[in-house]
Image (cartoon, grey):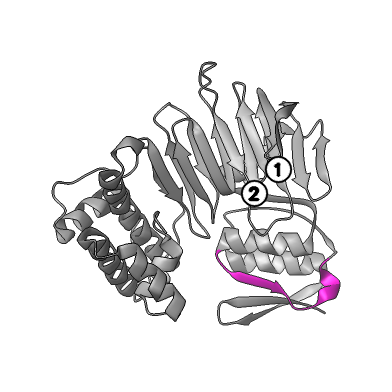
Amino acid sequence: MNEPDWVLLERVAIGHGSLADRAAVEQWIGGDPERQRLFESLGRIAEGTQRLNVGPRFDAAASLGRARSRLGLGRRAAPPRGWRAERPRWPQMAIAAGLFVCLGVGLTIGLRHRERETSRQLYATARGQRATLHLDDGTQVILAPASRLRVVGRTATLDGEAYFTVVHDPRAPFVVHAGKAIATDVGTRFDVRAYPEDSTVSVAVEEGQVAFATSADSVRTIPLVRGDVARLGVSGTAVDHGVEPAGISAWTAGRLEFHGTLAREAVVALSRWYDVDLRLGDSSLAALPLTASFRDEPVDEVLHIVAVTLGARVHWTGRTVFLRKK
């Protein structure tokens, strides 16, 4: 792996990796002292944060500066431009914060090895975390929980969900690759959702216009305008028109909404949003529809509302929550 795989590095650093994982990390380090120091720093951060119960709001710039000082990597450098984490959860978010510190250091190392790729940035959020990014061209991105975004110039690759407010440049369109979908802005605000575990990739336009295409046929495009939602699944592409635009960006303001969402899909979204392992303990609940709206309610209250709506009860086992039919 030429690019750091942060999940793999953390797993090996805290001693949870397999023999194959450790071999992959050793191959990536390859005797490079800076990569070795990055890996050791990640281990110290993960080990220290595992003991935390509470903590302050994460200051990425200050933390990165302290980390570079401890690692002897020279003067303080700012984190990737425009990063602002929101709603951190401790202690779970402490390791994510540490990962971001290492991510900033890792980018510095990567840039030393690839001087011609100075415009590349990689951003990631953990479960329970959102982040607001301001890219070099003025484009703003709000990154949803459990998402990864790679940006090279005016091209982005997304795993997860993100809301884009693009500064349009007709000479250099902003292009988002997500799964097998390609979204090109025509001066716009739009949402892209492409979690690996989802069966579909969706592009929803709140304002302006987006040219929608697939990786299999990038020449043939479908124009999407305000209120259009394109969904690409195994059976092809379907477009819904007249969707309420305000609902497209609701999650960016901290509001999680479900409108007749199947319970099996809703529990996945709730797990990402509240950083819990939520499961259906009864298969008969899977196809039940859930209609609800949440904003900053405690997770216990949210789970109670979901359970009542589905005619289920909540059962906790450690950090795993089961919804079982009454």
Answer with the quarter of the image where residue 323 lies.
bottom right
* Residue 248 position in % (x across, y down): 68, 38
Q: Is residue 239 left or right of residue 38?
A: right
Whether residue 163 sits left or right of residue 109 in the image: it is right
The residue that appears at 44% across and 67% down in the rendered structure is 8
Q: Compared with residue 309, is residue 319 higher up or lower down, i.e. above or below?
A: below
* Residue 33 tag number: none
> Mark 2–mark 1 contact, CB under 8 Å?
yes
Label 2, residues with CA under 10 Å away: few <14, some 14-19, many ≥20? many
Which residue is drawn at the image coordinates 26% and 69% (left, top)?
40
Write the residue at 54% across / 56% down. 146
Does 119 appear above or below 66? above
Q: Which quarter shows the N terminus?
A: bottom left
As shown in the figure, which amino acid type bears the numbered disc 1?
Answer: Ser
Q: Nearer the viewer, residue 246 or 223?
A: 223
Secondary structure found at label 2: strand
Q: Which residue is mark 1?
A: 202
Which residue range is magenta in the image? 275-286
CA distance for labels 2 and 1: 7 Å
Residue 322 sits inside the magenta stretch: no
Within-10-Å neighbours for mark 1: few <14, some 14–19, many 20+: many
Q: Amino acid at mark 2?
A: Ala
Spot occupied by residue 162 in the image (x, y as percentages of width and height): 57, 43
Q: Front-most of 79 and 244? A: 79
Tell how many labels. Answer: 2
SS assignment at label 1 = strand
- Which residue sits at x=51%, y=34%? 155
- Residue at the farthest bottom position: 317
The mark found on residue 194 in the picture is: 2
Q: Which quadrant holds residue 101? A: bottom left
**Above/below status of 321 relative to 253:** below
**How far from the left and from the top, in percent, is residue 281?**
75, 78
